[in-house]
Amino acid sequence: QKEVEQNSGPLSVPEGAIASLNCTYSDRVSQSFFWYRQYSGKSPELIMSIYSNGDKEDGRFTAQLNKASQYVSLLIRDSQPSDSATYLCAVGSNDYKLSFGAGTTVTVRA
Amino acid sequence: GAVVSQHPSWVICKSGTSVKIECRSLDFQATTMFWYRQFPKQSLMLMATSNEGSKATYEQGVEKDKFLINHASLTLSTLTVTSAHPEDSSFYICSARDPQGPGVAFFGQGTRLTVV
């Protein structure tokens, strides 16, 4: 599988703050990029998908993709305690296989 | 999003026995499904790609004779862990890609396997 690196965390932010998550990937021909949220003991849940350079916003979440820098990020605005989870960056290739990063654990302090 | 159902959600089995895990796409046909394994505090590792009507493709280091995959229909893939050992205890998760959709993978609920 291709390499996907995430800042390991844990990341602790106060409620209402912005949480910033970063991810880099090694395969230049990667086509699709995803952020999944995983609560302890549960399977991953899709938060965002992004396919082209730039920003994509969905509610309190914004994903940013820079293919030249092989970098994708996720911003969580107005963080809530329910956002406390592990966030997985996933990168897809032409064969639709996903390579996952190790995940960043986020804790939102009330 | 599309719904992928995985069963059972947890199973405890004795060492040396076999366990079958089912993965179903409920509202779409999935020609391709993926099986992952996740150990505690680690990320998901792809084990194999399940292809409807043909043999599964296994990732390097995954024993195909130990992890039997069958994808007999467009909505069902099964993973059988044969001769299970305690080191096979893990969280097994399947995913499916909706071929009509944007290429996003949807995950089943996962199966927590404990081998005693």
Image (cartoon, grey):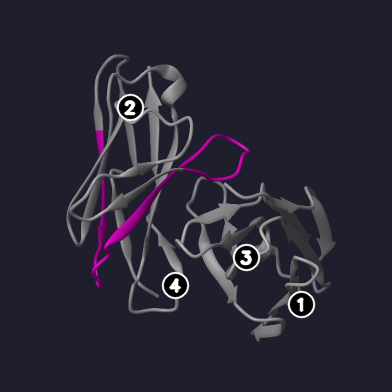
Query: Which secondary structure, mark 3?
Result: loop
Indicate the chain on which mark 2 is placed: B
Query: Which secondary structure, mark 1?
Result: loop
- Label 3 vs label 4: CA separation? 16 Å
Q: Are marks 3 and 4 on the same chain?
A: no
Q: Are marks 4 and 1 on the same chain?
A: no
Q: Which residue is mark 4?
A: B103
Residue at position x 32%, y 26% in the image: B66
Indicate the chain on which mark 3 is placed: A
Query: Which secondary structure, mark 4?
Result: loop
Nearest to viewer (mark 4 / mark 1):
4
Please name the amino acid that badge 4 sits on: Gly
Q: Is residue A11 above or below residue B45?
A: below
**Numbered mark located on residue A77 in the image:** 1
Could you say which quadrant of the image residue B59 lies in?
top left
- Label 4 vs label 1: CA separation? 26 Å
Please name the amino acid that badge 1 sits on: Arg
Please name the amino acid that badge 2 sits on: Ile
Q: Identify the mark nearer the N-term, 2 or 4.
A: 2
Q: Is residue B17 above or below residue B75?
A: above
Q: Are marks 1 and 3 in contact (CB under 8 Å)?
A: no
Q: Position of residue A31 (x, y in %)?
A: 58, 70
Q: Which residue is mark 3?
A: A29
Range covered by the magenta-colored residues: B20-46
